[in-house]
Amino acid sequence: MLNRPDKSIRDRLTKLETHLNNENPLLLDVVTRFKKLDTVAYKMGLLNTSESYATSIPWWPLVSVLGTFSAGKSSFINNFLADKLQLTGNQAVDDKFTVITYSSSKENRVLPGVALNSDPRFPFYQMSDEIDKVARGEGRRIDAYLQMKTSHSDKLSGKIIIDSPGFDADEQRNAILRLTDHIVDLSDLVLVFFDARHPEPGAMQDTLDHLVGNTINRSDSEKFLYILNQIDTAAQEDNPEAVVAAWQRALAAKGLTAGRFYSIYNRDLAVPIEDEAVRQRFEKKCEQDKAAIFERIHQVEVERSYRIVGALQTIANDIEKQVVPVVKTAMVKWLKMVLALDAIAIGVFAVILLVLSNLFDSWALFSYDFTNANIMSSLKLGFTVIGFTMVHFTARAFSARVIAKQIVSKIVIDKNLAGEHREGKILAGNIKNAFLKNTQPLRSIFRPMPVGWSMRSKRALLQVTADACEFIQTMNDRYTRPSGTAVPDTLPEAGAQQEEASIDVNNGAAVETLKTVKSETS
């Protein structure tokens, strides 16, 4: 029972499975693999029972739109959706994060932040707790940070778009940066907007520092697109290319020398360009860049499926290749430290008893008479054993705390290098807790294997990895066909019939044949 998720997690997973059953049955099968990883993690102490790997990643394609105030973020969103959803203007019009979702109703609605904070299906679930960590008491003002809007635009179907407030906001700054980090980690695509009217570094310093500076070393840096918006204002310059060059120099100064750079504007809001040749050149470049950006937004639905399945492989690999070696190494250090402290304690006890034996004959170190035991000798032996036992367990606890601090420091350093921000944890879970679970009082210090790690656990991870490979192969078959045979553009529909998976275990390695979709036509 201790290794089962609590009711709140079970309810969240049930809701997730219900949604996926209607949207994408292939990913419904993936949830069961995450549950297998959860079981291993619960036993090892990497997750507590109020957590699940399945709820730590977003299951909806998520596109984030970030940047400075008046960089044209809202105008871009309206243009993409062909829906005047977001307010636009030269001044800041939205000082909160706006989660934009599809609705079958043709009437656009604005819902308060609590709609997101209390719904586990959305990326800001229980975000009030995170805000409280940054600014105590601010979590109660969740509506001041978040809102949700609905749109009937078909382009929004199957994905979520998040419009953010500018980085140059003075109020609520720390909470805004905390929320920004959160959505950047969850997003499949991040659009970073800059204002072509102010391309100099000083005007976009916050964006440069927090986004560009922190993301160039991320393993997922390819999901960032850097966009110089409102480039039409540069058409009146003697050398409009100099505006783009100044912007790219500012990015390069922060270390961003490679990436995807675009320059666009909204033709409906553009300033008149009198020179016909210049106007056509600007329009052509803008349409090309917009088409490329819109295509990337469209692709997030495909990328989402690969990302989620890839997370299965990453977590399984991290548990075996990173967590287990780190915990084993920490256990060895802990054992050596405890034995060293025990040896010192024995030496101190010996010295104390020798001193006492010289001062008091009744405390002589070798005066125990085991054949004619008396009350005094029994008390001396009992006090000695109790004293050493107390010292031993104190040494165990002290050594565990010292080693655990070293583990946390190592994780924080590694994550800073990776450009990530959740201190004390990696994707595979909390290594500190996994180590401390091995230092519990009733567990022998000489046991070599971490708690919860066994051949059964290893086989479970091998099976999950094999399943993930099969999932990816199935998706490849649906999106690619070297033979040239036409394939559908989407993953299985909700009503598709599926064959039950068959599991074949051989020589300790699990190979599972993925459920195939019968309804697909050639």
Image: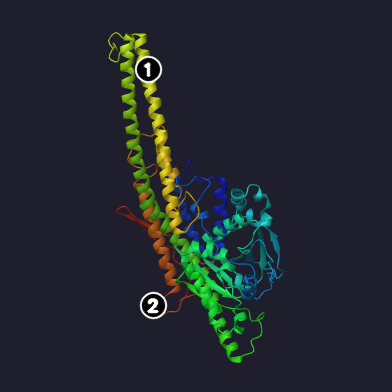
**Residue at figure coordinates x 41%, y 32% from the top left:** 441
> How far from the left and from the top, in percent, is residue 379?
38, 13
> How far from the left and from the top, in percent, is residue 144?
68, 56
Of all residues, the one furthest to the bottom in this rendering is: 276
Amino acid type at mark 2: Pro
26 shown above or below 487: above
Q: In this rendering, would 113 be left or right of 378? A: right
Q: Which mark is residue 382?
A: 1
> How far from the left and from the top, in percent, is residue 316?
40, 54
Number of labels in the image equals: 2
In which quarter of the view is residue 62 placed? bottom right
> How far from the left and from the top, in percent, is residue 16?
56, 57
Amino acid type at mark 1: Gly
**Residue at figure coordinates x 37%, y 9% from the top left:** 375
- The residue closer to the viewer here, 459 or 311, is 311
Say few, some or many: other residues with alpha carbon within 10 Å of mark 2 (under 14 / 14 to 19 / 20 or more): few
Does residue 123 appear in the picture of this structure?
A: no
Q: Quadrant of the C terminus?
A: bottom left
Say few, some or many: other residues with alpha carbon within 10 Å of mark 1 (under 14 / 14 to 19 / 20 or more): few
In which quarter of the view is residue 374 placed? top left
| Residue that mark 2 sits on | 482
Q: How is the image coloured?
A: rainbow
Does residue 325 appear in the picture of this structure?
A: yes
Mark-to-mark CA distance, 2 and 1: 79 Å
Tag in front: 2 or 1: 1
Element marked by disc 1: helix
Q: Which mark is residue 105?
A: none
- The residue closer to the viewer here, 112 or 289, is 289
- The residue closer to the viewer here, 411 or 17, is 411
Q: Earlier in the sequence, mark 2 or mark 1?
A: 1
Element marked by disc 2: loop
